Image (cartoon, rainbow, N blue to C red):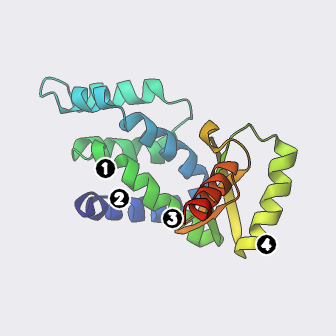
Amino acid sequence: MAEIATIARPYAEALFKATGNGAAGAAVWLDELAAVAANEQLRQFADNPKATPQQVFDLITGVVKSPLGDAGQNFLRAVIDNGRLGALPEIASQFRALVNSQQGSYDAVVYSAFEIDSAALAELSGVLEKRFARKLNLKVELQPELIGGIRVVVGDEVLDTSVKARLDQMKVALTA
């Protein structure tokens, strides 16, 4: 894992410098490219010696929904030409960390048993920002096994108010 992080760092830093104030916008298409690059079949196609870099580029740009622009196209060509398509998810992760540090915010994942509407998410965002004492970028993921409540992960900090966590705590208390 450290090797991929080492490979990804110069790409993330170079893209961050190249995009300047447009880094937040670049993060959108970079995340989409990373999701596409995570596909095993795509990586097998890209690793095939018969597939040209232009074919791989055309395939990826045909799949992504966000417009790449010149910076995105040049970046994708550099990644493909250097055989670093497999590092794209890590590049996106490191790029997101650079954008967050520039904006003074942190990524937070909210795991919920049920869908959270936008009004409740806005209210939750305010409460969590006070609790963690920092600006947060919330991403919601569904986990029905939580039964109810939420579990929030910000970096290495976890706030678990789910029903499942409380049931686990009661189980430990009763068996101790």
Amino acid type, mark 3: Ala
Asked if labels 1 and 2 touch by Cβ distance under 8 angstroms, the answer is yes
* Residue named by callout 3: 97
Residue bearing the label numbered 4: 130
Of pointers 3 and 1, the one earlier in the residue sequence: 1
User: Badges 4 and 1: C-beta atoms under 8 Å apart?
Assistant: no
Q: Which amino acid, by three-letter code, is at mark 4?
A: Lys
Do callouts 3 and 4 mark residues in contact (Cβ within 8 Å)? no
Which badge, 4 or 2, comes first in the chain's sequence? Answer: 2
Please identify, in this view, whether the residue under mark 3 or under mark 4 is nearer the observer. 4
Q: Secondary structure at mark 3?
A: helix
Residue lying at the far front in this picture: please name it. 175
Q: Nearer the viewer, residue 170 or 131?
A: 170
Q: Residue at x 70, y 50 (%)?
A: 163
Determine which residue is flagged by label 1: 87
Tell me the SS state at disc 1.
helix
Q: Depth-wise, is mark 4 or mark 1 nearer the camera?
A: 4
| Residue 80 or residue 71, whichever sits in front | 80
Up-down: is 78 above or below 161? above
Which is nearer the N-term, disc 2 or disc 3?
2
Determine the CA span between mark 3 and mark 4. 21 Å
Marks 3/1: CA–CA distance: 16 Å
Question: Along the polypeptide, which appears first: circle 3 or circle 4?
Answer: 3
Q: Label for residue 11?
A: 2
Give the CA distance from mark 2 to mark 1: 9 Å
Q: Residue at x 43, y 61 (%)?
A: 94
Res. 18 in view = no
In front of the other: 16 or 93: 93
Contact between labelled residues 2 and 4, with CB atoms less than 8 Å apart: no
Q: Measuring from the top left, give residue 117's x and y in whole percent.
A: 82, 40
Residue sitting at x 48%, y 46%: 30
Mark 2 and mark 3 residues within 8 Å of each other at the beta carbon: no
